[in-house]
Image: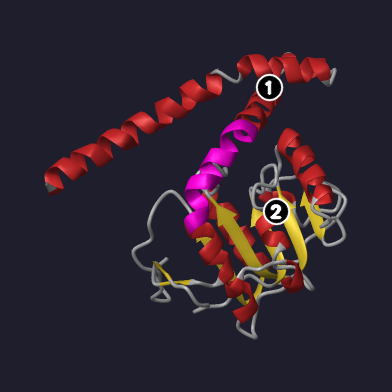
Amino acid sequence: MDTLATIWDAFIHVVDPWRFMSISFRHIPATIRGLIHEKDYGALLSFARFEEALFGTFWATIGPNVKLNAEQRVIPLLEGRIKDGVVHDEVVSTPVYGTVLEVGAGSGMYADVFARFREGADSAHDNESLRHRKTTGGHITKMYGVEPNPISAKALGQRVKDLGMDDIYHVVPVGIESVDDPSAWNGKIEPGSVDCIVSILCLCSIPEPEKNIKLLYNLLKPGGRWYAYEHVKALSTSSGHTF
């Protein structure tokens, strides 16, 4: 039985990238139509810019389905209801709080979830677990959404406005390496200024992951927390925790 499971896992590992590629190719016509509608003809002549546009169109379509499958783990993680890889009914660890940075925020798929954590949001939601937060966390006071894809960043900005979060939410339309560079975008994230980092199914696609993960860690305050939900399972970490 274990052998069959291993063979199946290996098969899925090989097939999944090709399946995603075939799905993305189906979004080429919609991407072309979108660029023409926006009169962004230059992107039609640039492979790099067209690739960015295709990626944004692809995730705008497939993202909700990905969220549907992932949120049964992601939401408890953000609420502090996961410990040692097990989901609990009550809060057993620190929920997201303070200044939060989401890596690869996309078009704002989880913005509605983060909206529940902003200060003063308790009375507007019936989620009992959010009312039993630990005193060390549970309220977001400022948020950065790092999203270098221009199509996704634009959609993210609109999503934030629709949710009424634009007073605390800052869209960061650049890569990780430029978040502390005010000449690259209209802002700057100082080292040691972030309480929590959130990465949801995105670290597999960032360039130079080891370099950029170190850059992200430098943004955390001492004792800051990183909430990660990715495609792979971490059996253990140097601190002894299992996610």
Q: Is residue 70 left or right of residue 141?
A: left
As shown in the figure, which amino acid type bears the numbered disc 2?
Ala
Q: Which residue is mark 1?
A: 50
Chief secondary structure of the magenta portion: helix
Q: Is residue 65 magenta?
A: yes
Q: Secondary structure at mark 2?
A: helix
Real-space CA distance between mark 2 and mark 1, rounded to the nearest whole angstrom: 26 Å
Residue 59 falls in image quadrant: top right
Q: Residue at x 72, y 73 (%)?
A: 122
- At which x and y percent is residue 107? 70, 42
Query: Can you see residue 40?
Result: no
Q: What's drawn in magenta, residue-wise? A: 59-72
Q: Which residue is mark 2?
A: 111
Q: Residue at x 62, y 73 (%)?
A: 130
The quadrant the C terminus occupies is bottom left
* Lower position in the chain sequence, tag 2 or tag 1: 1
* Number of numbered discs on residues: 2
Q: Secondary structure at mark 1?
A: helix
- At which x and y percent is residue 60? 65, 34
On residue 224, the disc is none
- At which x and y percent is residue 2? 14, 49
